[in-house]
Image: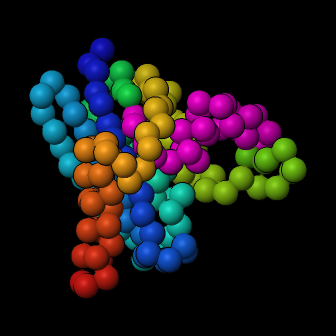
């Protein structure tokens, strides 16, 4: 199984507001950078969407390590929240609807195609690829707003 490293980040200008996401995929010495923006969204949606977009680039099942500064995204899997939500019909322990169900479901489906490990990185620190993803996301917002 091919080993792929992915870094992701999401950003929002206002929350909700115009949002952007960025990702860098690395495999066998090659790098692919992707990004995009949405008109009315939230930071958490952009964080999830970055991971989804990156995983959707993969053409076959891979062993993937995803690095993200989003506790929301990483803990969703690392602490098993997503599996509990799925079992309970996408309800939280307080019986309220889980936010961003559409994206959690897409991401969960992708983790069943690929072997995915999530790693939390510190945001806005000295991680070169996290900083690059942040720039991709914020540039996507700027480009969207000026279009």
**On the rendered image, what quadrant is the C terminus found in?**
bottom left
Q: Residue, x 71% and y 53% (percent of image)? A: 98
- In the image, residue 69 lies in the stretch drawn in magenta: yes
Say whether residue 105 is left or right of residue 61.
right
Say whether residue 96 is left or right of residue 61.
right
Visible in this render: residue 73? yes
* Name of the residue lying farthest toward the top: 1
Spot occupied by residue 57 in the image (x, y as percentages of width and height): 28, 41
Q: Is residue 76 above or below residue 146?
A: above
Say whether residue 117 is left or right of residue 135.
right
- In the image, residue 111 lies in the stretch drawn in magenta: no
Q: Residue, x 47% and y 32% (percent of image)? A: 118
Visible in this render: residue 106? no
Spot occupied by residue 61 in the image (x, y as percentages of width and height): 35, 24
Spot occupied by residue 67 in the image (x, y as percentages of width and height): 39, 37
Q: Observer-nearest residue: 106 or 43?
A: 43
Q: Residue, x 37% and y 65% (percent of image)? A: 20
Spot occupied by residue 38 in the image (x, y as percentages of width and height): 40, 70
Q: Observer-nearest residue: 124 or 130?
A: 124
Q: Which residues are magenta?
A: 66-89
**On the rendered image, what quadrant is the N terminus found in?**
top left
Classified by dominant secondary structure, the portion drawn in magenta counts as: helix
């Amino acid at each position: 199984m091919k080993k792929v490293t992915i870094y992701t980040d999401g950003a929002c200008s206002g929350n909700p507001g115009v949002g952007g996401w960025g990702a860098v995929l690395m495999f066998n010495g090659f790098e692919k950078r992707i990004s995009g923006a949405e008109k009315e969204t939230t930071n958490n949606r952009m964080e999830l969407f970055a991971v989804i977009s990156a995983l959707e680039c993969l053409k076959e099942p891979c062993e993937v390590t995803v690095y993200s500064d989003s506790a929301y995204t990483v803990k969703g899997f690392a602490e098993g929240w997503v599996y509990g939500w799925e079992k309970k019909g996408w309800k939280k322990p307080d019986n309220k609807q889980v936010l961003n169900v559409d994206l959690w479901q897409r991401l969960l489906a992708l983790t069943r195609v690929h072997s995915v490990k999530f790693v939390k990185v510190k945001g806005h620190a000295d991680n070169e690829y996290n900083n690059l993803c942040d720039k991709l996301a914020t540039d996507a917002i700027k480009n969207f707003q000026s279009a």
